[in-house]
Amino acid sequence: MSYAFLKELRNLSVVVLHPMDEEGIALTDHLRRIGCMPQLVWPVPEQLPRHTNIVLVAIVDDQREALRNLFRNMGNPAPTILAIVSYENPATLQLVLESGALAVIGRPIKPFGLLTNLAIARNIWCQTQNLARDARRYKRKVMGEQAVMRAKTILMAERNFDEDRAHKELRAQAMQRRLAIEAMAAEIISGHAARFPAAGENRAENFLSDETESD
């Protein structure tokens, strides 16, 4: 078990969505013993408490609709989710899939293996978030390069520049305005689209909308 993960547990807020019975209380107590900051919540709320990092959720028949509503209301990214199930059937499996759970804990809940399941689920969650962030950065990079090329093409056509001179002009304008060259390119594209709507308005809007995505 990674020492870094065990240290991280102390800073993670854990919500246990489980009936407040003997099993739910025992699970919460065990999570506290292994270093988490658990909160036992029941019935299923419309939204999770703020800054929830990990959710252990009991898949209970009479709470199916409430659980579906909760899963739909989770933010992006959703917290790390572990599902607690009593038995396997198509309806239960469907709800587990809808939850986005990264690990499944069977009943009766046993302390042995709980920490391992937490570590694996959290590690998968972190890797997924890193991949998503890298994908967004790569997309913005590609879109930025495309915008720079299109802006240079506009300058070449409007001012009779060659590519090298168009690039220097684009960079000079960006430095003068204290903008990134990609942002300057987007302004040139937008200005061109305003003057010639049929020539590229949609392409400029698409680039600008993609630029607003955050990590």
Image: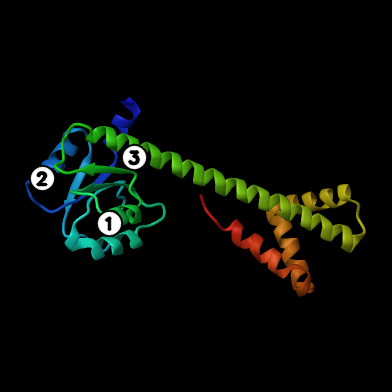
* Residue 167 percent across, percent down from the top left: 82, 49
Q: Nearer the viewer, residue 45 or 214?
A: 45
The residue identified by callout 1 is: 48
Residue 121's label in the rendered image is 3
Looking at marks 2 and 1 on the same chain, the residue that comes earlier in the sequence is marked by 2
Disc 1 residue type?
Leu
Looking at marks 1 and 3 on the same chain, the residue that comes earlier in the sequence is marked by 1
Residue 155 is drawn in which quadrant?
A: bottom right
Q: Which quarter of the rendered picture does the N terminus lie within?
A: top left
Identity of the residue furthest to the left in this view: 22
Element marked by disc 3? helix
Nearer the viewer's eye, disc 1 or disc 3?
3
Disc 2 residue type?
Glu
32 vs 145, left or right, is left
* Distance in Å between CA atoms under marks 2 and 1: 21 Å
The residue identified by callout 2 is: 23
